[in-house]
Image (cartoon, rainbow, N blue to C red):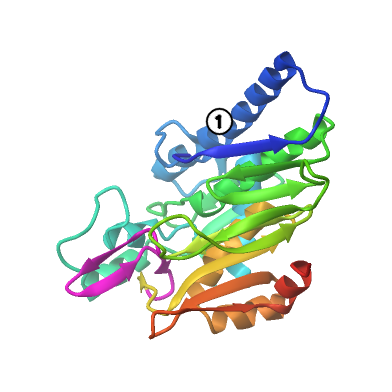
């Protein structure tokens, strides 16, 4: 998945052989997600689906279908702010493998590409474990929630192995169970946006929950004096222009925290906050004001979960 992972298990029962076995199982679980959902591996399930020039149902594993199911659910809840088919627009604005463009996409280009984008053009059939696209040019990218799903997969593995206290992190997305080595609730840091180095903005207690953060402060570039975020709004076909710089979401499942954080990052500090409150989502919004200072706002659900 092009990132790192970290697993901390609290136990007194592991010898070197058992540790090696557990580590191998964890790496296999992560590799399984990557091999199924990678857009970089030409042989992955997702790549084969994307490259298929058919609108007929395409067979997928139960794992990939489950991730598509979460993706389409969050797309519906956010009125398309979250959309796994947005890739062509992301690439056109210079955040794909081709890198930064020399000029902005034209109105014509944006309109043309929007015809190749839209989660409603995907049809999922859980009973037959298939997905189909009404437009054969449609492509999907699950990277906005696959890391979170990988965290959940490792969590299920450790739980099945009988462990009840651990922390799993994949590329910054985190899920905890039980207590840390001092017998306390796990405390996880939310990164301070745009500090130039990794600094903790806030520590939150995370008890049997997941935390995912989406931010615009690492992946951006400037062209013609404009700062462009990698966060593309599928509904407009353009990078978001609001001042929201980071959203952190707490959910039971990391796959959903991952997707919701991305969606709220698209919706922005006002519409996103209103929707999060309406849905009862635990979210922390960090906005950069015109004075350059960071201002945070938390939903009631986030405040309730993070009370010390």
Q: Residue furthest top?
A: 17
What secondary structure is found at the residue carrying circle 1? Answer: helix
Rendered residue at 43%/74% (across/down): 235
Q: Nearer the viewer, residue 159 or 19?
A: 19
Give the position of the C terminus as an image quadrant: bottom right
Rendered residue at 64%/70% (across/down): 283
Numbered range of the magenta stretch: 217-236
Q: Quadrant of residue 275?
A: bottom right
Residue that badge 1 annotates: 31
Residue 108 colored in magenta in the image: no
Total marks placed: 1
Q: Is residue 5 left or right of residue 98?
A: right
Image coordinates for residue 86, horizontal then vertical, percent = 42, 61
Rendered residue at 56%/38% (across/down): 5
As drawn, 143 above or below 9: below
Rendered residue at 68%/39% (across/down): 153
Q: Nearer the viewer, residue 144 or 282?
A: 282
Image coordinates for residue 282, horizontal then vertical, percent = 69, 70
Q: Is residue 80 visible?
A: no
Residue 219 colored in magenta in the image: yes
Q: Is residue 300 left or right of residue 109?
A: right
Q: Nearer the viewer, residue 99 or 120?
A: 99
Q: Is residue 294 visible?
A: yes
Q: Badge 1: few (under 14), some or many (20 or more) residues near its Cα, within 10 Å? A: some
Image coordinates for residue 145, horizontal then vertical, percent = 56, 52
Image coordinates for residue 175, horizontal then vertical, percent = 69, 49
Q: Quadrant of residue 48?
A: top left
């Amino acid at each position: 998945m092009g990132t790192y992972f970290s697993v901390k298990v609290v136990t007194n029962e592991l010898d070197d052989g058992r540790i090696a076995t557990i580590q191998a199982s964890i790496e296999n679980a992560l590799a399984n997600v990557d091999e199924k959902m990678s857009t970089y591996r030409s042989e992955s399930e997702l790549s084969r689906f994307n490259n298929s020039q058919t609108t007929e149902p395409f067979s997928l594993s139960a794992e990939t279908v489950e991730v598509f199911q979460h993706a389409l659910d969050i797309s519906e809840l956010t009125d398309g702010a979250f959309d796994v088919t947005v890739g062509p627009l992301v690439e056109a604005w210079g955040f794909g493998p081709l890198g930064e463009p020399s000029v902005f996409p034209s109105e014509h280009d944006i309109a043309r590409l929007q015809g190749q984008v839209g989660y409603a053009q995907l049809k999922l059939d859980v009973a037959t474990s298939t997905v189909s696209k009404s437009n054969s040019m449609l492509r999907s990218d699950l990277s906005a929630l696959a890391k979170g799903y990988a965290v959940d997969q490792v969590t299920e593995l450790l739980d099945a192995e009988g462990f009840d206290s651990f922390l799993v992190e994949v590329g910054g997305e985190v899920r905890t169970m039980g207590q840390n080595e001092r017998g306390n609730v796990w405390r996880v840091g939310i990164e301070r946006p745009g500090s130039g180095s990794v600094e903790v903005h806030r520590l939150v207690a995370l008890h049997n929950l997941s935390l995912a953060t989406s931010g615009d402060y690492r992946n951006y570039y400037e062209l013609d004096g404009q700062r462009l975020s990698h966060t593309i709004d599928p509904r407009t076909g353009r990078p978001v222009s609001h001042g929201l710089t980071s959203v952190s979401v707490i959910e039971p499942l990391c796959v959903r925290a991952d997707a919701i954080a991305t969606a709220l990052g698209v919706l922005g500090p006002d519409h996103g906050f209103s929707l999060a409150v309406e849905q009862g989502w635990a979210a922390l919004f960090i906005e950069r004001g015109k004075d350059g200072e960071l201002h945070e706002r938390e939903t009631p659900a986030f405040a309730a979960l993070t009370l010390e």
